[in-house]
Image (tube, rainbow, N blue to C red):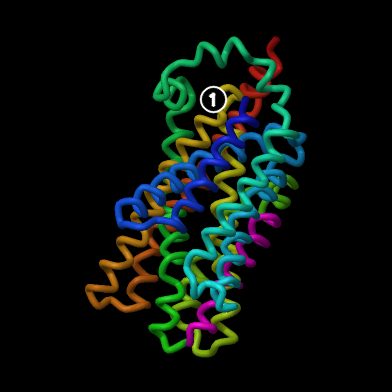
Amino acid sequence: MLGVRSGDVVVLTGGFSLGTAHADSYSTLLIARLVTGLGLGAALPILIALASEAAPEHLRSTAVSVTYCGVPLGGAIASVIGMAGLGEDWRVVFYVGGIAPILIALVLMLWLKESQAFRARPAASAGDAGLLTQLFGPGQVSRTLLLWLACFFTLTVLYMLLNWLPSLLMGQGYSRPQAGAVQILFNLGGAAGSFLTGRMMDRGHAGRAVFIGYAGMLASLAGLGLSSSFALMLVAGFTAGYCAIGGQLVLYALAPTLYPTHVRATGVGASVAVGRLGSMAGPLAAGQILAAGAGVGGLLLAASPGLVVAALAARALLGQRKRAVLPAAAQNAAP
């Protein structure tokens, strides 16, 4: 069921992305973007849950990281389209972003199988309790709240960078092609950070992954604000992407391990939804901070406290993960 559902959601997302390219009024454009966003928000937790279930336990974080690599790689492709001049007609990027998911969805619906753990629990799935009971039941309260806190502040900073980085760079005197190059390296760094962070977690170095992700984010924010040459800015952009998207991957890899199988997609989906609130708050707050005259340095400094909170929450989640492993394993093994 999850495999079919993921295919349906991807088709919906691709279809409304194509609809965006043909929007003939503001209201039509608004509806198309809203539904596309809903589709993206629904597809990601389903795909993460599927990747987590399909992989053996010792490769679970790697499977999630490989799945999530598609997000920054897609961002890099969009940046390349813009730099190549193909983006002068703004519809091109929506054609690419609409047709490709629909083709991939056909593959998902034809060949993607449900996990054995999910198929083995029809009774539990049919009798699911309410959403709040699933997420805040016995032993789940602190896990859910810590995960939400970490997701919110991590995505606040990540989407602030994704939305404002080109404008910030051009405001510092860099040309549009230079800003595009930094954006591409940001996304490529994100893909590398996603994959390598997943491998690090599967090798038992989750604490190290958390430290590298969040300490690296703080350092790269300083680099973006203080770099005095284009070469240093490229390094700062790559590092920021590596650490920011790698830090987000830590949370997405942890989330499935915190919940039993029949609640897994719900738990991951709720954390993604809370993160999406952060992804809206970050760019909005950045606009207000810049409008107040704080400048690039003030904006990046204002993002730092949220990263510290997210880092502490992510570190606390590692202890919750260890306590969740044995109960989840026993529940999934039950007939």
Relative image position of residue 272 (x, y in whole percent): 48, 42
Q: Quadrant of the C terminus?
A: top right
The number of numbered discs placed on residues in the rendered structure image is: 1
Give whichever of 28, 73 is nearer the camera.
Answer: 28
Relative image position of residue 171 (x, y in whole percent): 38, 83
Q: Residue at x 69, y 32 (%)?
A: 53
Q: Residue at x 39, y 51 (%)?
A: 278
Find out whether residue 210 is within the magenta segment: no
Give whichever of 240, 128 is nearer the camera.
Answer: 128
User: Is disc 1 placed on a helix, strand or loop?
Assistant: helix
Give whichever of 262, 104 is nearer the camera.
Answer: 104
Q: Residue at x 42, y 44 (%)?
A: 35
In the displayed structure, 73 sits above or below 325; it is below
Find out whether residue 190 is within the magenta segment: yes
Decide if residue 308 is in sight here.
no
Few, some or many residues within 10 Å of mark 1 (<14, 14–19, 20+) = many
Q: Quadrant of residue 288?
A: bottom left
Q: Which residue is mark 1?
A: 263
In the displayed structure, 57 sits above or below 124; it is below
Q: Residue at x 56, y 16 (%)?
A: 125
Q: Amino acid at mark 1?
A: Val
Relative image position of residue 140 (x, y in whole percent): 47, 27
Please provide the residue range marked out in magenta: 175-196
In the displayed structure, 98 sits above or below 180; it is above
Q: Is residue 217 left or right of residue 61?
A: left
